[in-house]
Structures are given as structure tokens and as C-alpha cells.
């Protein structure tokens, strides 16, 4: 366990007593260049503008089968039943997420270290990277509940002490993502606007927020302003497609009442220049299976 003890200035005050103004972000979404990895200059320019990049067929059917097998294995693993890394759906008790999957699955650990993934993450954040967080989301059929509108960075800043939004998330679809089975919605370009949240972070907030987030979500007024300004896109695509997205993009997903589960693998690559300090708006650090504090660069 290591914590970056340098006290970083709080550039993104949030979880305030009263509504704060939007903060137009000074930091880029893309820190590397076309010379640093497989993304071309136009790919990077589009990512800078939109805050996300969709790659169809990022992994092939055999890898989809491999990771889906891991997803099923972990969901059925009785030894994980009372493990804090296993999050269940509040109403049905079915598995909603499993965290820290690189420590539970060699195949997923290898995926995180595969140059095919790592070179793209390094290119976007412009430095060596380490895993801030990984999770498998199950979004089960019929009763899967979604994720209300939020910025991941707002939580990672407030509750994990992530100084600036110099981190990129990879979501790989392991099932077909349709518009109707809880597909992720994003507001293209919203990564440039930081929306301070109102309301203090409750003690041990993660024990509730990972099932349904309340602290740190933006107000209806802020969501309306952002949606009017940026619009709403939806990440749909066949199993195997990937969404690379900026840590501060406003996103969310609806419930899944269809017979088709919407499962994905989610890996967050944070820059080793942006390691966690003390939480900026919470009394205590979150557990390391949610916010990794081992900052060794991934190889
Ligand atoms: O609190 C977190 O870290 C998680 N919460 C959400 C809704 N998305 C990002 C992250 O997995
Ligand atoms: Fe999220």
C-alpha cells in the first residue's frame, strides 16, 4: 500500500454544501501523440473532441468466449460469495459486478498487460500506467439495474484522491450491446466540463454506491444543461467491441428488462503521474480492490 503523500491542490472541488459552477477542464483528454502508439493522429483528435473512441471487433470471438467463461466462473465461485469484491443486485441478489478481476483471473490479468491494450492506454494518458480499478459488470437479463448519470472522475477525485482526469477506461462488451438492454449512454464532449456535486460523502459510501450511486451524482439541472449542450450517444455494438473513454465523461445506463444480459469487462488505466493522494471529499480511503494504491507501472 503506498499513498502519494505530496498534497495535491484540489483543482476540482466537489460534494459541496451548495451548488458550484461547472469547471471547464484545463487538462487534455489525450496526452500522447500518434508516434506513441497504434491510435492515428485523427483517432486521437476525435478522442480529444468526443472524449471516447469505439473500436468494433476489438477482440475476436475466441477471446470473447474466454473472458465470458471467466465472467461465468467468477459469478459462480462460491468462495467469492462473501468477498467484498462481489457486488450483488440489491433487489434480486444476482451478481452485479466483480471487482479486482486481474487478481481473480489470469486471463484478465494478461489482457490488462497485453500490449494490444496497454499501448493504447499509455498513448492516451501519455505515460506509463497502472490499474486504478477493474470490474466485470453483469447487467443481468430481466432484472439488471443500470447506473445513474455520473462522471467516474468525480468519484475517483472525491473518494479516491485522484488529482486530475489523466486516466482512461476501457469497456469491452462480452455480450451484444443493444440500445434496449441497458447500453451505456455517453454525452460526447462532456469530458471537458467538470460538474461539482452537492452533498457530503457518507461514511463507507462504496458499500451503497456500487449498487446505486447517490452521493456525487449531478443535479437534474446540470444533466439537462449538459445533455442540451453535448447530446447523448449510446455505445452499442457486438460482443468484442470496445469503448475507450475519458474518466470525466458524463455517462450512465438504463435498466435491462430484456432477455439479453449486457456484460462487459471494465479496466481503468491511470497515469503514474496522477497517483492517488488522500481523498479530496471523503473522510477515508476506499478499499484497495476498488481504488488500487499499488502504483507500479503495468508491464
Ligand atoms: O465508484 C466507482 O469507482 C465506480 N462507479 C461507477 C458508477 N462507475 C465507475 C466505477 O466503476
Ligand atoms: Fe461509471
Image (cartoon, grey):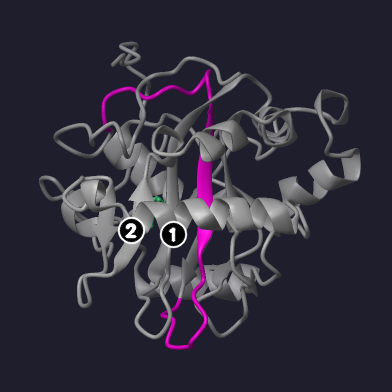
Say the numbered circle drawn on residue 72: 1
In this picture, residue 33 sits left or right of residue 169: right
Q: Residue 130, position in %: x, y?
A: 51, 25
In this picture, residue 87 sits left or right of residue 103: left
Q: Residue 117, position in %: x, y?
A: 68, 36
Q: Residues within 10 Å of mark 2 (few under 14, many from 20)?
A: few
Say the numbered circle drawn on residue 271: none
Q: Residue 270, position in %: x, y?
A: 52, 30
Asked if residue 195 can be seen in this view, the reply is no
Instruction: Judge by depth and name the residue closer to the eye, 220 or 201.
Output: 201
Q: Residues within 10 Å of mark 1 (few under 14, many from 20)?
A: few
Q: Which residues are magenta?
A: 254-279
Q: Residue 10 sits in which quadrant?
A: top left
Q: Residue 48 sits in which quadrant?
A: top right
Q: Residue 237, position in %: x, y?
A: 70, 70
- Residue drawn 24% across and 39% down? 281
In this picture, residue 153 sits left or right of residue 184: left
Instruction: Judge by depth and name the residue closer to the eye, 241 or 80.
Output: 80
Q: In the image, is residue 182 above or below residue 79?
A: below
Q: Does the magenta segment cover residue 256? A: yes
Residue for badge 2: 76
Contact? badges 1 and 2 (CB < 8 Å): yes
Asked if residue 104 can be seen in this view, the reply is yes
Could you tell me what secondary structure mostly forms the magenta stretch? loop
- Residue drawn 74% across and 35% down? 116
Q: In the image, is residue 8 above or below residue 6?
A: below
Q: Residue 35 sits in which quadrant?
A: top right
Secondary-structure class at tag 1: helix
Q: In the rendered image, which quarter contains the N terminus?
A: top left
Q: In the image, is residue 212 above or below residue 248?
A: below
Q: In the rendered image, which quarter contains the C terminus?
A: top right
Secondary-structure class at tag 2: helix
Amino acid at each position: 500500500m503506498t499513498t502519494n503523500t505530496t498534497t495535491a491542490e484540489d483543482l476540482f472541488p466537489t460534494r459541496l454544501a451548495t451548488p458550484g459552477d461547472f469547471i471547464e477542464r484545463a487538462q487534455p483528454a489525450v496526452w500522447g501523440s500518434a508516434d506513441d502508439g497504434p491510435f492515428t493522429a485523427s483517432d486521437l483528435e476525435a478522442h480529444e473532441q468526443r472524449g471516447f473512441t469505439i473500436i468494433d471487433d476489438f477482440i475476436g470471438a475466441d477471446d470473447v468466449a474466454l473472458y465470458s467463461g471467466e465472467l461465468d466462473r467468477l459469478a459462480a465461485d462460491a468462495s467469492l460469495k462473501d468477498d467484498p469484491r462481489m457486488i450483488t443486485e440489491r433487489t434480486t441478489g444476482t451478481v452485479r459486478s466483480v471487482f479486482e478481476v486481474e487478481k481473480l483471473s489470469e486471463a484478465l490479468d494478461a489482457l490488462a498487460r497485453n500490449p494490444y491494450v496497454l499501448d493504447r492506454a499509455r498513448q492516451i494518458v501519455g505515460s506509463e500506467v497502472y490499474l486504478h480499478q477493474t470490474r466485470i459488470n453483469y447487467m443481468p437479463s430481466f432484472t439488471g439495474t443500470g447506473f445513474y448519470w455520473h462522471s467516474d472522475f468525480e468519484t475517483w477525485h472525491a473518494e479516491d484522491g485522484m488529482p486530475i482526469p489523466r486516466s482512461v477506461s476501457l469497456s469491452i462488451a462480452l455480450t451484444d450491446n443493444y440500445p434496449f438492454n441497458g447500453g451505456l449512454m455517453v454525452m460526447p464532449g462532456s469530458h471537458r466540463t467538470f460538474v461539482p456535486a452537492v452533498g457530503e460523502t457518507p461514511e463507507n459510501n462504496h458499500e451503497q454506491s456500487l449498487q446505486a450511486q447517490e452521493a456525487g451524482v449531478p443535479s437534474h439541472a446540470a444533466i439537462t444543461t449538459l445533455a442540451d449542450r453535448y447530446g447523448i450517444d449510446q455505445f452499442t455494438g457486438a460482443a468484442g467491441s470496445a469503448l475507450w473513454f475519458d474518466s470525466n465523461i458524463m455517462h450512465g445506463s438504463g435498466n435491462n428488462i430484456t432477455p439479453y444480459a449486457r456484460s462487459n469487462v471494465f479496466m481503468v488505466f491511470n497515469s503514474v503521474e496522477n497517483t492517488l493522494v488522500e481523498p479530496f471529499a471523503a473522510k477515508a480511503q476506499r478499499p484497495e480492490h476498488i481504488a488500487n494504491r499499488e502504483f507500479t507501472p503495468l508491464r
